[in-house]
Amino acid sequence: MVYLFSEEFEVRDYECDIQGIVNNANYQHYMEHARHCLIKSVGLDFKNLHDNGIDVVVSKIEIAYKKSLTSGDRFVCRTNVKKEGIRYVFYQDIYRMSDNALCTKGRVETVALVDGKLGVSEVIEQALFDGKLLTE
């Protein structure tokens, strides 16, 4: 897969469970932060969107866990986004940097609510399409 965006992280001690590995829920946090960074990179701001009646919300998440991360591991969340109907689908894979091991494969479906109703936001479309970030 060709990735359009990457964000680097380091595992913090408190993100690990008693087994010494990253708790499964934290991978969603990593992916969400990477999506927010991607959105900011094209000039969008979630608070500004919300203040203007536009909310992008997750409608479905699928994560396949391949290898565990542990405290101190450096890793990268690589992201691609495609438009499927009215959904923006983020493909997000997490790789451990020390050996480039694939740790998780994620697929996150999002939709836009415009003034509380499912719809298409011209502001989002323009930022993603005009920036050549998104293809149908």
Image (cartoon, grey):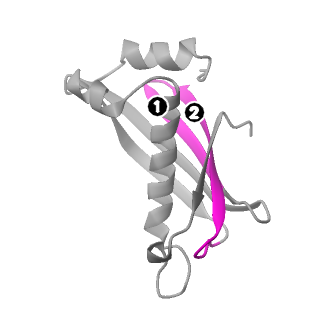
Q: Is residue 66 left or right of residue 101?
A: left
Element carrying mark 1: helix
Quarter placement of the N terminus: top right
Which SS class for mark 2?
strand
Q: Residue at x 34, y 32 (%)?
A: 46
**Could you classify mark 2 by the number of other residues whose Cα lies within 10 Å: few (under 14), some (14-19), or many (20 or more)?**
many
- Vertically, is 84 above or below 129? below
Figure quadrant of the C terminus: top right
Name the residue beneath numbered marker 2: 81
The residue at the point 67 percent across, 70 percent down is: 67
Residue 48: where, in percent of width, then height? 29, 26
Q: Residue furthest right?
A: 99
Residue beneath label 1, please?
40
Q: Main secondary structure of the magenta part?
A: strand
Distance from disc 1 to disc 2, alpha carbons, whole Å, reads: 14 Å
Q: Position of residue 110 (x, y in %)?
A: 42, 37
What is the total number of numbered labels drawn onto the structure image? 2
Dot 2 amino acid type? Val
Q: Is residue 87 magenta?
A: yes
**Residue depicted at x 65% and y 63%:** 74
Q: Residue furthest bottom?
A: 18
Residue 94 in the image, given as x and y percentages of width and height:
63, 56
92 part of magenta stretch = yes
Q: Are marks 1 and 2 in contact (CB under 8 Å)?
A: no
Establish if 30 lies above or below 82: below
> Within 10 angstroms of label 1, few (less than 14), some, or many (20 or more) residues?
few
The magenta-colored residue range is: 68-94
Residue type at tag 1:
Lys
